Amino acid sequence: MPPAPDIAPLVEGLHRLFQKSGHKAVARILENWPERGRADRAVPPRDLPVTAFLPEALGNAPKDTAPLVRELTGRAPHLHWRQTYSEDDLGADFLRLYGWTTMFGPDGYVDSDRLLSGFLFLGPGVEYPVHRHSAEEAYLVLSGEASWNIAGAGWQRRPAGTIVHNPPWQLHGMRTDRGQPLLIGYLWNAGTIEKSQIMG
Ligand SMILES: [Fe+2]
């Protein structure tokens, strides 16, 4: 197996940007942030088709988030990219344009049984349907103009730099309907991965 990628710049970048947001719920969630920022374990690389859009996400990233997006883009082929859904759930087109990679968590590079954190990525022209889950979650938009439907409020633009806080069971969905891929940093305030309920 190749050596574990140096994830420290990714972990530090996520922490810095979430902290800088000044968002109250985010500050509370960050109390569960694991202390170690270096890889505990080697995870075999697994690439997915969607990562081909990362250079485009880097090109669209604002000044604040671009350094982290650059670090991620450079390491992407060495990371383990995952999908929670199957073709039966959301179709083959969605799976070509969707993936995530976790830094912390039971299957991540760093063990954490309280908080999961990593990156979620959608290619352009896809809908992640409105869904919900029991875990509290915070998103930070790192790159990409997209439409968001939060708590049934209708589809609204959320530019890069935005925090989206989802309390347990809050409905949320995203559409990359503005021609740009959408890169998000996430904090999942629970120790286990959970498949969301898709509301359609
Ligand atoms: Fe979510």
Image (tube, rainbow, N blue to C red):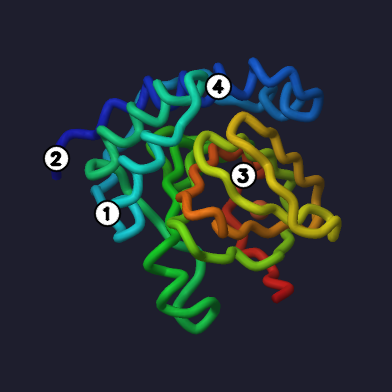
Residue at (46%, 70%) from the top-left corner?
94
- Determine the CA span between mark 2 and mark 4: 26 Å
Q: Amino acid at mark 4?
A: His
- Determine the CA span between mark 3 and mark 2: 27 Å
Picture quadrant of residue 38 = top left
Query: Visible in this render: residue 189?
Result: no
User: Which residue is tagged 2?
Assistant: 2
Whichever of labels 4 and 1 marks the residue nearer the N terminus, that label is 4
Q: Residue 191 shows which numbered tag?
A: 3
- Determine the CA span between mark 3 and mark 1: 24 Å
Which residue ends up furthest to the front in the rendered image? 178
Q: Amino acid at mark 3?
A: Gly
Instruction: Say which element carries label 1.
Output: loop
User: Which residue is tagged 4?
Assistant: 15
User: Which residue is tagged 1?
Assistant: 47
- Residue 186 is situated, as x and y percent measured from the top left of the image, at 58, 39
Instruction: Say which element carries label 2.
Output: loop
Picture quadrant of residue 68 = top left
Nearest the viewer among 187 and 32 is 187
Q: Are marks 2 and 4 in contact (CB under 8 Å)?
A: no
Q: Nearer the viewer, mark 1 or mark 2?
A: 1
Whichever of labels 1 and 2 marks the residue nearer the N terminus, that label is 2
